[in-house]
Image (spheres, rainbow, N blue to C red):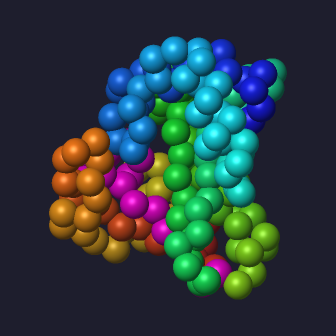
């Protein structure tokens, strides 16, 4: 993503339903969006836009280091594109490449709020294993939440 994507970014970043399970609050202005992209997106070591064929971003997907052998995957998608396979395809593509790009990692993890059923389905469709519920695991916007732990190992098979 680049700063020129700010208007596309605002489509999902201003939507409270998109931000519901995210650590960030919905964006309230173009200046705030520019600051977020500048400070958080452009500086992120591994973040990629999820784009339509015309090149317009409809979300993003990222990989974060947990420790020396684990990485975590996260993603966000404009609500208009929910349920259409875009997130599933993005997660599948990134999962297929992450172990090649980072051969030292032993597992890719995803942490999903227990109420975020759509995101849980995305991971299950790709072949992630649902390991269990981590009770009172994350604090999101002042609320301590139960979180489902998913994993994918290099020996697992993509679906």
Extent of the magenta region:
105-120
Please state if 114 lies on the left or on the right of 112 as rendered.
left
Residue at horizontal 67%, vertical 21%?
6
Report the residue at 19% width, 47% height from top. Answer: 143
Q: Is residue 89 left or right of residue 119?
A: right
Check if residue 118 falls in the magenta segment: yes
Quadrant in which residue 51 is drawn: top right
Q: Position of residue 30 (x, y in %)?
A: 59, 15
**In this orientation, which residue lies closer to the viewer: 98 or 88?**
98
Name the quadrant of the N terminus: top right
Residue sitting nearer the eye, 72 or 81: 72
- The quadrant in which the C terminus is found is bottom right
State the count of labels: 0
Instruction: Indicate the position of residue 40 as horizontal and vertical percent values.
Output: 61, 43
Q: Quadrant of residue 22?
A: top left
Q: Is residue 59 visible?
A: no
Residue 155, quarter of the rendered image: bottom right
Question: Measured from the top left, where is residue 71 in percent x and y?
Answer: 57, 70
């Amino acid at each position: 993503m680049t700063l020129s994507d700010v208007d596309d970014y605002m489509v999902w970043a201003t939507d409270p339903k998109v931000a519901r399970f995210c650590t960030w609050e919905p964006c309230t202005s173009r200046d705030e969006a520019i600051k977020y992209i500048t400070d958080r997106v452009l500086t992120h070591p591994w973040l990629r836009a999820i784009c339509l064929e015309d090149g317009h971003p409809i979300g993003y997907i990222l990989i974060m280091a947990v420790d020396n052998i684990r990485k975590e995957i996260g993603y966000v998608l404009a609500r208009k594109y929910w349920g259409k396979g875009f997130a599933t395809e993005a997660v599948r593509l990134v999962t297929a490449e992450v172990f090649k790009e980072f051969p030292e990692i032993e597992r890719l993890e995803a942490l999903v709020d227990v109420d975020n059923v759509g995101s849980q389905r995305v991971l299950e469709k790709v072949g992630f294993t649902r390991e269990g519920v981590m009770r009172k695991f994350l604090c999101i916007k002042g609320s301590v939440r139960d979180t489902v732990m998913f994993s994918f190992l290099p020996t697992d098979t993509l679906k």
